Image: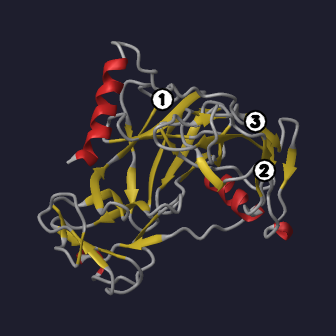
């Protein structure tokens, strides 16, 4: 038993030698310098060309200082200027002080997906997120404003088929699909179900090989699950998230509201759905002012237009009507990017 005596005595002596409060405090981690983007800089005005689509779009920066040795992961994020990074998109991640594997085509697609029209300068902001581990807060660089002109390109968005009783249970029907506008496996779309008590499922591809239903009607998706049922006919917004296998749906009737409309911001002017053209439409007299689109006479689902580029975003800026007149207005919800048309008659 003597072989245990020394460590026991040593521990006792150690405890006895330290008075209350004499232990050294644990070190407190303090964040030092944030990284700083060095290229592109705030004076940059960059024109993207389709001929250079496969060339790298290079970002460089200075190192973040966390006041201790650490392997830092840097993420390059971009968003519309003035959006305060409420909806940032990741361009790429690097453990060094540069990102050189992001292609021009990727940056271009990000800008187009955010509604920037081709061949027109767009104002964005770029920042860095520096991380070391979950216990240390992420450090962000200052946002750098950059002007980038994208080129026009047709983006092929990932899609999820929606076969059902309303269209003959045909998963190959390209007119009944919803899209992942950010290519993040989160799908959304608006589909018109002409009959009450319609049923549908989701298929990943134009066949039944991988299909999802909702067994128990609890908002979760299961492979080969039960048909999803809708009580009423009408246009529904469908959302399906294949990351966590959840889904939701809501029936929508659309209207126009705003200072340009006959009842201004007090009530909606009801739009009519055209099933042949697959759009909502209305013809009415407007005065100079502003309008928005909203569903179900409520602000929970509403569209405006950030950037005045004829693409719609949820909760976005009011749409200007320049002068009095009789107008025909179309709301088009059939694609990955929602759009509208305003025509003076």
- Left or right of 73, for residue 20: left
Work out whether mark 1 precedes mark 3 in sequence or the reverse, and give the earlier one: 3
- Where is 178 relative to 44, above or below? below
Residue 345 in view (yes/no): no
Identify the colour scheme used.
secondary structure
Query: Which of pointers 1 and 3 indicates the residue nearer the eye?
Result: 3
Residue at the limit of the structure toward the top, as seen here: 20
Ranked by sequence position, the earlier of labels 2 and 1 is: 2
- How many angstroms separate mark 3 from mark 2 (CA)? 11 Å
Q: Nearer the viewer, residue 132 or 285?
A: 132
Question: Between marks 2 and 1, how big is the CA–CA gap?
Answer: 43 Å
Residue 261 pos. (x, y %): 48, 30
Residue 258's label in the rendered image is: 1
Secondary element type, mark 3: loop
**Residue 50: image x %, image y %?**
81, 67
CA distance for labels 1 and 3: 43 Å
Q: Nearer the viewer, mark 2 or mark 1?
A: 2
In the image: residue 47, left or right of residue 250: right
User: Mark 3 highlights which residue?
Assistant: 36
Q: Residues within 10 Å of mark 1 (few under 14, many from 20)?
A: many
Task: Give the residue number, with chain letter if any, for mark 2.
Answer: 59
**Looking at this view, is 247 or 228 the one in front?**
247
């Amino acid at each position: 038993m003597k072989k245990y005596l020394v460590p026991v005595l040593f521990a006792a002596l150690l405890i006895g030698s330290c008075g209350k409060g004499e232990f050294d405090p644990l070190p407190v981690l303090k964040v030092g310098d944030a990284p700083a983007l060095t290229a592109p800089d705030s004076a940059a005005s960059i024109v993207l060309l389709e001929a250079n689509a496969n060339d790298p779009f290079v970002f460089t920066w200075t190192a973040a200082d966390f006041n201790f040795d650490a392997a830092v992961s840097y993420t390059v994020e971009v968003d519309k200027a003035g959006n305060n990074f409420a909806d940032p998109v990741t361009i790429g991640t690097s453990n060094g002080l540069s990102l050189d594997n992001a292609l021009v085509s990727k940056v271009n697609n990000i800008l187009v997906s955010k509604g920037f029209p081709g061949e027109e300068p767009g104002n964005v902001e770029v920042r860095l997120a520096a991380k070391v581990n979950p216990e240390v807060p992420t450090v962000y660089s200052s946002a750098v404003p950059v002007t980038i002109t994208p080129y026009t390109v047709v983006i092929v968005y990932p899609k999820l088929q929606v076969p059902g009783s309303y269209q003959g249970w045909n998963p190959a029907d390209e007119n009944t699909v919803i899209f992942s506008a950010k290519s993040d496996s989160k799908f959304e779309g608006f589909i018109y179900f002409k009959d009450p008590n319609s049923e549908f499922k989701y298929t990943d591809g134009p066949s039944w090989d991988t299909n999802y239903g909702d067994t128990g009607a609890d908002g979760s998706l299961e492979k080969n699950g039960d048909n999803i049922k809708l009580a009423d006919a009408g246009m529904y917004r469908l959302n399906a998230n294949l990351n966590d296998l959840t889904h939701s749906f809501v029936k929508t009737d659309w209207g126009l509201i705003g200072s340009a409309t006959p009842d201004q911001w007090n009530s909606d002017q009801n739009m009519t759905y055209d099933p042949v053209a697959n759009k909502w439409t209305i013809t009415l007299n407007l005065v100079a002012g502003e309008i928005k689109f909203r569903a179900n006479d409520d602000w929970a689902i509403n569209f405006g237009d950030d950037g005045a580029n004829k693409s719609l975003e949820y909760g976005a800026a009011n749409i200007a009507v320049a002068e009095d007149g009789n107008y025909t207005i179309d709301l088009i919800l059939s694609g990955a990017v929602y759009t509208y048309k305003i025509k003076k008659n």
